[in-house]
Image (cartoon, rainbow, N blue to C red):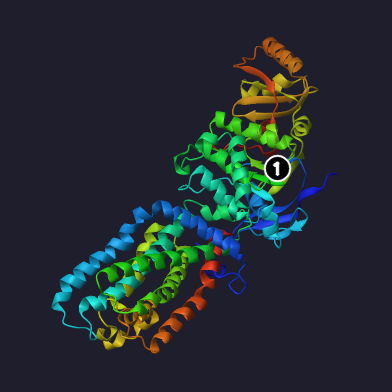
Amino acid sequence: MRRSVIAARNLVKRFADFEAVKGVNFTVCGGECFGLLGPNGAGKTSIAKMIYGFSPVTAGKLEVFGEDIMTGARNIKAKIGVVPQEDNLDPELTVWENLLVYAGYFRMPKDMAQRRAGDILAFMDLQDKSGAVVEQLSGGLKRRLTIGRALLNQPALLILDEPTTGLDPYARHLVWQRLKKLKESGTTMLLTTHYLEEAGQLCDRLIVLYHGEILERGAPRELIERHTGNDALELGVEPARHGVLMEGNEDLIKARQMLGDDLVLFTGHGRELAERISGRAAALGIPVRHQRLRPANLEDVFLKLTGETLKED
Amino acid sequence: MVKRKQLFNGITAIPDLSWPLVMKVVYRNLLVFKKTWKANIMFNFIEPMLYLWAMGFGLGVYVSQIEGLSYIDFLAPALIASSAMFSTTYEMTYGSFTRMGHQKVFQGMVATPVSMDDVVMGEILYGTFKGVLYGIVFLIVVALFGLVKSPWALLTPVPLALMVMSFSVMSLVWTSIAPNYDSFGYFFTLLISPMFLFAGVFFPVDNLPAGIRFLPWFTPLYHAVEVIRPLLHGKVAWSNLADLGWLAAFVVLTIRLPLTMVKNRLIQ
């Protein structure tokens, strides 16, 4: 087993009137991308903030690089990079000044800071924005700069708290691409997200959090296979007829879920199930408004686990 | 709103300070100041100039003498102190509130080896620098009007620094509990403006009604004015050391407060 970068044992975060994290256990190993997945209020950000020393641990133990975060915050923070949920760049300063000032907080010598800042502008594709004042940048460019800034100290651990929330699809893909590159180069990452696609694309392993507790853990593919199988069949059929329609096909149905009036069937054998169901519907004269076979994804797993949707709205 | 118990949590602990990093925080603020000072100069500099003209050269003509000085000689040294006070106070209320709230600059800094104590100490030093700078600029203007009578005036930055540091502390304490920008109105109306009007800037505190004559003694502005006025006229006395001592004691006794209170507001 590779060395562990983060070790959380019975980790608890309590605020004045509620418990945000209720005794979670997990370990993040060197070189992996570890996901904290859950809806808003699940405790993801509370955990991330404890890891980068912003929020004190209420109870339990949290070690980063083998050191207790409550006593070694300064040392630990020197070795991590943080991309917070909300941008906190210096709006009045230029892109270049933002990077140099931030390098100063790591007590980086000036020539090294300039070299690193140059590398980062190139890596995040921001060279032509070097002299631009940050408050005039678009949301996507600010996010890229925030991520770039987190890389200044060549962190052994990168903490990304909802790195693509609020970005348009193009900007999101650009960020994902850069994060994949970092992952390939061996950077350990902790990613919180409520975008299941993001978790599926980037994470090697993840935990699903819900109301401050861990519901499930594993690799994305593993979770999908365990809970839903590879395929999802969506059927627009009167709820009253669902039972009749499924009769005789139970051997193929691994799980099912109601989504509004629609029925979603999860299975390892999508094509076969789809054929059987449409055959049965035709034979019994059950009207099918629409039918769609698609690959199952983490969202399905989450829905099945919580009966709730992850999206904010 | 944070509960009172939580507000002072950790006040007895030794602050977690790394001075090189405190200076990085100061440097960051100076870098921004270099870009914005032209827009700020109005409040902090032109306003006391207007007072000097209106009160000193206008109203002052009708005032015979105060404590053996012409009115403009009485007023000008005190305006150095009050203009420094205003510049620090604006910076450590509206400015700091913006950095910790809307801009989240503090939050960005503490994700690095910089601690929250470093950030707040950096703010205090920056507020002090800014007040001293504006005080010195105004001192130069006063000198150009021929109102500086003694080389003792070169020591003006000493009482100025102690005074504006105490205003940094007071302002940050208010900022740490301020729910929004509007609440700074109370700070200025209830604290800063009364000091400006009644702490010996425009008239000697002896003219206050007997029952409240002791009040100015509790304000840093009064003690700074009490030192700066004799410095400009070369009439220093040993008693001025007591005023400096009062200012220094105020800073030493209160500086732990904003470090604790800002931290407890932001880190929960």
Depth check, front residue: A299 or A155: A155
**Image coords of residue A198 (percent x, y):** 65, 34
**Image coords of residue A64 (percent x, y):** 74, 53
Depth check, front residue: B54 or A176: B54
Q: In this view, does B74 lie to the left or right of B165?
A: left
Residue at horizontal 56%, vertical 46%? A99
Residue at horizontal 51%, vertical 73%? B255
Q: Is residue B11 left or right of residue A222?
A: left
From what the image shows, is residue A279 above or below residue B63? above
Farthest residue toward the left?
Answer: B62
From what the image shows, is residue A264 above or below residue B72? above
From what the image shows, is residue A265 above or below residue A187? above
Image quadrant containing the N terminus of chain A: top right
Q: Quadrant of residue A115?
A: top right
Q: Quadrant of residue A107?
A: bottom right
From what the image shows, is residue B249 above or below residue B26? below
**Image coords of residue A111 (percent x, y):** 61, 48
Residue at horizontal 53%, vertical 44%? A96
